[in-house]
Amino acid sequence: MIESLAAIFYAPTKVEEAKGVTINRVIGGERMAILDPIMLLDHASISAESDIVGFPRHPHRGIETVSYVISGEVGHKDSNGNEGIVGPGGTQWMTAGNGIWHEEMMKPGPEGAEMLQLWFSLPRNKKRIPAAYQGGPAEEVPEVTKASAVVRIVAGSFEGTEGIFKGIAVNPTILDITLHDNATLEIPADHGHATFAYVIRGKVTTTRRTVSAPEQIVFGDGDYVSLTAGPQGARVFYVSAKPLHEPIVQYRSFVMNTVDDIKETTDMIHAETFAT
């Protein structure tokens, strides 16, 4: 058994994209523009004193998004007529496909509101599939309890337990891991996959390096990933997915394969035929 080696350690980039929202960009920022097929990971938060704020109506095309709520509530509304609100531990999955308009608003609780959002590039043959949405409240997200950790499975599987979302095109593994004090968890790894762990809380040691929140670890090939928490425990967001190895052209919230695809998209926006 070969342990996956940790390749990169760094803190996210702060970005200004939504009034009243603090955004730490883990992937998609200046330090890591892409981790194929993962286009973006944002850690967004608002204070307990905030109004309902977030991301007003805007378009997407060519991606799937997963939003995972840590605290407070996050509401979704889109041009297909879908609406949903999830609280802590809840998650929402949106397929932008050929095009969708949506808004995502955060409502604070006593601890404010906090969420993680992932963007996955859709494979070339699925860039133009119909848009779709699915919400999952916290009680529907399965978890595995071990002596070392509690592992919530958002997508993929862990120790035979399947995650809530099974239709994501790139078929990722997405885990919310709460490690107990000084405990070690080993996660089976797939060779050739893009794999990273984002430390939300606490400190984690892996391959003899210690990483503190809010830093990211990107892993190389190996049979398993080993994570050991510090004396105060840790919370880690773990993601792994098989690369697409396809051309990717991104313009704002559109992720396509060619410049012509992007031009087609912007032409549709200007002609008011996008997602109609």
Image (cartoon, grey):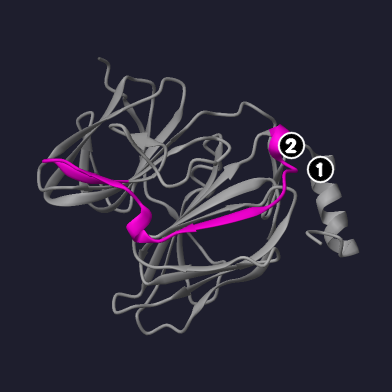
Identified at 39% across, 60% down, the residue is 90
Identified at 59% across, 56% down, the residue is 133
Q: Which mark is residue 245?
A: none
Q: Which mark is residue 261?
A: 1
Tell me which corner region of the image, top left, top right, bottom left or bottom right, holds residue 225.
top left
Find the residue positioned furthest to the right.
271
Q: Relative to residue 70, is residue 264 depicted above or below?
A: above
Q: Amino acid at mark 2?
A: Asn
Q: Secondary structure at mark 2?
A: loop
Find the residue positioned furthest to the top.
1
Residue 9 horizontal/vertical position (percent): 35, 40
Question: Residue 59 or 230: which is nearer the viewer?
Answer: 59
Identified at 55% across, 29% down, the residue is 243
Tags 1 and 2 in contact by the CB under 8 Å rule?
A: yes
Crowdedness of circle 2 by 10 Å Cα count: few (<14), some, many (20+)? some
Residue 99 horizontal/vertical position (percent): 74, 54
Which corner quadrant holds the C terminus? bottom right
Mark 1 and mark 2: Cα distance apart in space: 7 Å
Q: Is residue 253 left or right of residue 92?
A: right
* Location of mark 2 (residue): 257
Q: Amino acid at mark 1?
A: Asp
Q: Which residues are magenta?
A: 124-152
